[in-house]
């Protein structure tokens, strides 16, 4: 059941569930490459289908800043609530046609966040050494090195003019408007919801990028510049607990 536009828009609505966490995602860079859907489908667990746009699967590297991360009833904690994350992701839907994100990996430089995400959400977080320095011209220099790997990935980017919300039906809408993730747990596939306003999409100027994460996750290197680039200044997010995928 391929997701309809109505289903895509319905996922924007606030879930009728108690949320468990506050997060802020800031200074996001989305670097997307198109792939043969058959190749990406082979990396999916049972119950998930690769979501395609114009007949292509899309895989993204997304570096960004995680800020003010805290449980619902707790304040932010200095030294713990702010950290960095870079994820490698693709787009899928489940047997009910619900669209979401499948993460191949999520690099993170906060050990507690790695532990919480692995144990509470069964997400493939990876320990990494990471830095992010933003200059007076707002250009971000962002580095990441997974623990045990010799290579340092470097991203240098600057968010430019703000475009606004992605237009329904556009490629930007397809890529950005995702309000669920899927996780493979010992008890089967689970769905995790998030809620935030639609991303304020911005143009991004990128002078340096790295595709090391493809190799680390067993995917072929694209061997070319990104097929699509965009950014966002960020959103405030509510995170909801995992639920079984057979629930409406």
Image: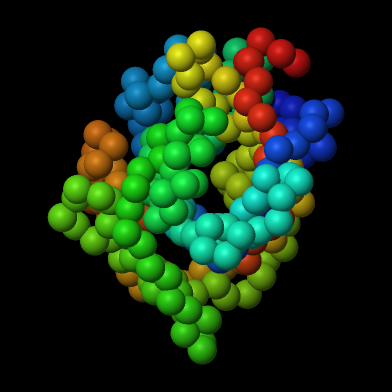
Instruction: Give the x, y percent position of residue 124.
Output: 41, 35
Q: Residue at x 80, y 29 (%)?
A: 17
In the depicted view, which residue is nearer to us: 137 or 160?
137
Q: Residue 230 at x, y = what percent? A: 53, 60
Please state if 55 lies on the left or on the right of 166 as rendered.
left
Is any part of residue 209 visible from this angle? Answer: no
Badge count: 0
Q: Quadrant of the N terminus?
A: top right
- Residue at 55% across, 72% down: 159
Give the answer, above or below, for where 30 lies relative to 185: below
Residue depicted at 15% across the width and 55% down the height: 150
Give whichever of 55, 48 is nearer the camera. 48
Can residue 146 be seen here?
yes
Q: Could you say where residue 51 lies in the image, as x and y percent from the top left?
A: 53, 29
Instruction: Name the residue located 52 percent from the left edge and 81 percent from the top edge.
Output: 138
Viewer-nearest residue: 37 or 106 = 106
**Left or right of 182 in this view: 169:** right
Q: Out of 105 and 92, give the one closest to the viewer.
A: 105
Q: For the view shown, which residue lies furthest in the bottom direction?
A: 136
């Amino acid at each position: 059941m391929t997701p309809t536009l109505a289903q895509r828009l319905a996922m924007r609505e606030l879930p009728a569930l108690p949320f468990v966490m506050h997060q802020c995602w800031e200074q996001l860079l989305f670097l997307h490459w198109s792939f043969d859907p058959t190749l990406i489908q082979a990396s999916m667990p049972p119950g998930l289908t690769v979501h395609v746009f114009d007949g292509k699967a899309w895989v993204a590297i997304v570096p960004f800043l995680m800020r003010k991360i805290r449980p619902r009833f707790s304040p932010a904690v200095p030294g713990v609530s702010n950290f960095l994350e870079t994820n490698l992701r693709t787009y899928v839907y489940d047997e009910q046609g619900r669209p979401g994100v499948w993460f191949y990996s999520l690099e993170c430089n906060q050990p507690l966040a790695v532990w919480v995400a692995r144990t509470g959400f069964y997400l493939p977080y990876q320990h990494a050494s990471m830095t992010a320095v933003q200059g007076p011209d707002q250009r971000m220099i962002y580095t990441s090195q997974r623990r045990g790997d010799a290579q340092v990935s470097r991203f240098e980017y600057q968010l430019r003019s703000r475009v606004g919300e992605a237009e329904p039906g556009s490629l930007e809408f397809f890529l950005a408007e995702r309000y669920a993730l899927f996780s493979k747990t010992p008890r089967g596939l689970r769905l995790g919801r998030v809620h935030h306003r639609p991303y304020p999409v911005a143009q991004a100027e990128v002078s340096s990028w790295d595709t090391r994460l493809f190799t680390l996750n067993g995917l072929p290197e694209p061997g070319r510049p990104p097929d699509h680039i965009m950014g966002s200044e960020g959103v405030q997010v509510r995170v909801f607990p995992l639920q079984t995928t057979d629930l409406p």
